[in-house]
Amino acid sequence: MKTISRRAICSGIAATAIIPVRSLAQVPPYVLDLRDLMNARYGVGGWTGRTGIGVGTDIGPAICDGLTALRANFYGGIIDIPPGVWLLNTPIPANLLSGSIIRGLHSQASIIVFNNPGNAAFSFNGSGGATGGGMRGLAILLESGLGNTNSYAIILNGDSVHQQDQTEWNDLYISAWGGSSYWWDGFHADGVARTSPLGVRVATLNNVQVFNTRNAPFYLKTTVQWTLNNVGAYTGIGPYANTVLIAGAVHMYGEAVNAVLNIFGSSDVLINGTRYS
């Protein structure tokens, strides 16, 4: 099998820049650093983090550059988000993100601010069979001043053939900058389109907290073999404020779930020691 170096991947992302590669002996080629991707996209010194409300360089195009290269060479990989506050205007689409991991240091250090009132910040759908992946160690905040939006922080929504199966979501803090903006849903998974095998399958949510939604903090529909551990919903508005909405689930287990539970049409659901079906 041909060996592909991290330098070769990075140098192909932008024709005008070769990404400076850190610690080649230690960093696998399928792990890319956001700062390197920003340098390749905008030039060294040509970008900033978020410096104010809606001010800063959009990290979306650079993340998409990295995901494109990783998918072409490895069928997916990891993009590291360093500590800091980063502005995201451009949604990250499922056709690039599915099967990869977006990874921060931890949810109080690596902060992404989504400045878009009508889209999903991060979308997954198992596109082309690219399952697995997920997100970890990140805060995803809706930008200040957007009001009641139709945006999602994270959405999993495949089709009759492909769903985003076998994923992990760890140490995520989904909220809004300053508390004046509201997501539609925070974490939204809908596997209803696939009946064989049923639903979106096998996921773990660990230490995932969602604030400031105007529909449902967690919308989990037709999910199979999901585990919820230390999941919480707060400061929401609307019909399902502070709710984990579970519909058509099969084999779901949860503990330390701090939210209103709305469960229907499900089987083998055990949360906080209580069996609901």
Image (tube, grey):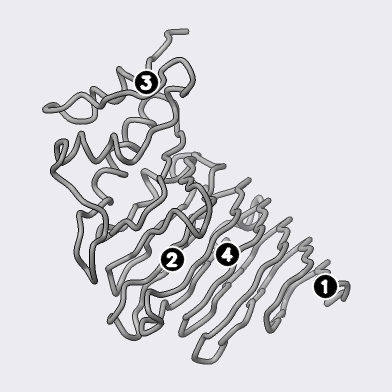
- Of labels 3 and 2, earlier in sequence is 3
Secondary structure state at the residue bearing disc 3: helix
Q: Is disc 4 surrounded by few (<14), some (14 to 19) or many (20+) residues within 10 Å? A: some
Say the numbered circle drawn on residue 153: 2
Q: Is disc 3 surrounded by few (<14), some (14 to 19) or many (20+) residues within 10 Å? A: some
Q: Nearer the viewer, mark 3 or mark 4?
A: 3
- Of labels 2 and 1, earlier in sequence is 2
- Is residue 161 visible in the rendered image? The answer is no
Amino acid type at image mark 1: Asn
Say the numbered circle drawn on residue 272: 1
Secondary structure state at the residue bearing disc 1: loop
- Is residue 85 visible in the rendered image? The answer is yes
Query: Which residue is identified by label 3?
Result: 6
Amino acid type at image mark 3: Arg
> Distance from label 1 to label 4 (Cα)?
25 Å
Say the numbered circle drawn on residue 84: none
Position in image of residue 254 (x %, y %): 77, 66
> Distance from label 3 to label 2 (Cα)?
30 Å
Position in image of residue 200 (x %, y %): 61, 55
Position in image of residue 166 (x %, y %): 63, 45
- Of labels 2 and 4, earlier in sequence is 2
